[in-house]
Image: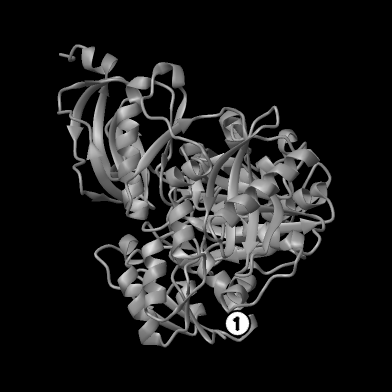
Amino acid sequence: MINSLLIANRGEIACRIARTCRDLGITTVAVHSDPDADALHTRTADTAVRLPGATPADTYLRADLVVKAALAAGADAVHPGYGFLSENADFARAVTDAGLIWIGPPPAAIEAMASKTRAKQLMGIEPLTDVTADDLPVLVKAAAGGGGRGMRVVRELGRLKEELEAARAEAASAFGDGEVFVEPFIEGGRHVEVQIMADAYGTVWALGTRDCSLQRRHQKVIEEAPAPGLPDNLLDDLHALAVQAASATGYLGAGTVEFLVTSDGRAHFLEMNTRLQVEHPVTEAVFGLDLVALQIRIAEGHWLDDTPPAPHGHAVEARLYAEDPARAWTPQTGTLHRIAVPGDGIRLDTGFADGDTVSVHYDTMLAKVVAHAPTRAEAVRKLAAALERATLHGPVTNRDLLVRSLRHPEFVAGTPDTGFFDRHLHALTTPVPDPCAPLAAALADAGTSRSPHGGWRNLHSQPQTKRYRTEPDGTEHEVRYRHTRDGLTADGVRVIRATPTLVVLEVDGVQRPFTVTTHPGSDRVYVNATTLTPLSRFPDPASQQAPGSLLAPMPGTVVRTIDIAVGDHVTAGQPLLWLEAMKMEHKITAPASGTLTALHATPGLQVEVGTLLAVVQEAQEAQEEPKS
């Protein structure tokens, strides 16, 4: 029996594992880097051990330190979660060699399947070697790990070498293994996977299917179970292949076998993940299981029933990220002042609490939001409504994108493929501002302690004027209102109530309430689901940048630049440098064709949001004659 368990991970999955351990009466040990000393997973565990490291990102990859921490804390077992060392066979061996119980498959099974190249060979599939133009498009993938890291689509043969180098660098940073391979890229496929669970006595469960086709940067965004619309014969084939993969490797515990299903119904094996998946909650909801509890019981020597429980209903999960989808999915950081998702039966798995900081060092997933209902349509509607009503105060998130995606006709019909965001991203991210939100913010501010003299004017006929910018799209709004003997008034709108935290307006006979929130230390104003920044009436000279200035869109580290010097000509869209943030590389390109007049970025330079990286003077500007 396991009495104490070390969780070799952080964030949401560490909190989720700790929750099950509490239910089972197992005490938990957290490990943490220096930036995570006060993180939610550290606070949630019964005890915690600091992991020293050269960088915060590398800390959780030190197998020797994790094993040492487990022994020092008196743990009986180690659960790796997902990511980091979860598919590292050497780590699994180090755990068992130290006399600890490993919550996962045997090292030999990890080695057989954790490398995508070896897994494909085991399934009789050979990766591409000598790529020609006839093979395009192709997909460059990291042999280790997952999460889309180290993955690139290449459509031009001339870009293959560059993308291979970038994929190797990203994979080495994320997984400590820079091996990559190339395979054909299948357009318009559906990403379907089968959850398996295996015990030590030869029983293997195939726990239905999941559809994970809505992806950005080859990372899953919305997942559901079961995968909609698959014919029975294809389901039987997928289940059989998944059980075959598990049985061939002597598998133990939880794993996932992933496939790409083409439009004509053919299934192509992608990989087997020898760990728990991020999207496992949808399977738990449909089968009424706790997969982490099952992992622990199997590690303790218990056996599975001959057949799994029957599935019921449908479940959908959305990954809530601190990122800006309209700006190339740029990660966002900062203080998360408030996170709350309402709704009966809504599951929220998160590694953050109010007031926590979204760090530059790690993936920016804030939470997983899961809805379960008797039918797919009901589950989708339930999840979209919960996200729409969520309170998210802090960095920009992908919440609006998630809501619109869940309500998009293609998704509602159950037919999306992996190209969904390629086709619809512009429409899904086009701003739809609430015209009343800036007015509500101004009315809440009027006459409060924040603006004690805001209502006084020498000319009573002139309205008060305030300006706001909606975030993240940057649209500016000017609103006007008046103080009268009857209270606050605004043209075309009836003001029913106006307090510092609640404004009720009537527009065209319809009353609408607006909750208005501010937080100490932040200049943002949150009005329902709209985020506003109050603007001064006077421009800030310090904020003015030279035309063509290329600013860092996120905090991170410059990992490399192209061979270019000040005075060289560049073309619009040409890559100039790469920033690494959240263990992923982000390409920074020239905003226009012209001359590079300044280059401040050098490899190894750490930058904050807004740091000046380079300046490109547009061609027409460079050709203009100086005025006499």
Q: Secondary structure at mark 1?
A: helix
Percent x, y of residue 415? 72, 35
In the depicted view, which residue is nearer to us: 508 or 275? 275
- Where does label 1 land, which residue? 22
Residue at 33 percent across and 21 percent down: it is 158
Percent x, y of residue 398? 56, 47
Task: Name which quarter of the figure residue 234 lies in.
Answer: top right
| The C terminus - image quarter | top left
Residue 567 in sight: yes
Residue at 47 percent across and 41 percent down: it is 121
| The N terminus - image quarter | bottom right
In the depicted view, which residue is nearer to us: 505 or 250? 250
In the depicted view, which residue is nearer to us: 96 or 438? 96
Task: Name which quarter of the figure residue 444 lies in.
Answer: bottom right
Percent x, y of residue 86? 45, 62
Q: Is residue 343 above or below residue 211?
A: below
Report the side of 167 relative to 460 (left or right).
left
Residue 464 in sight: no
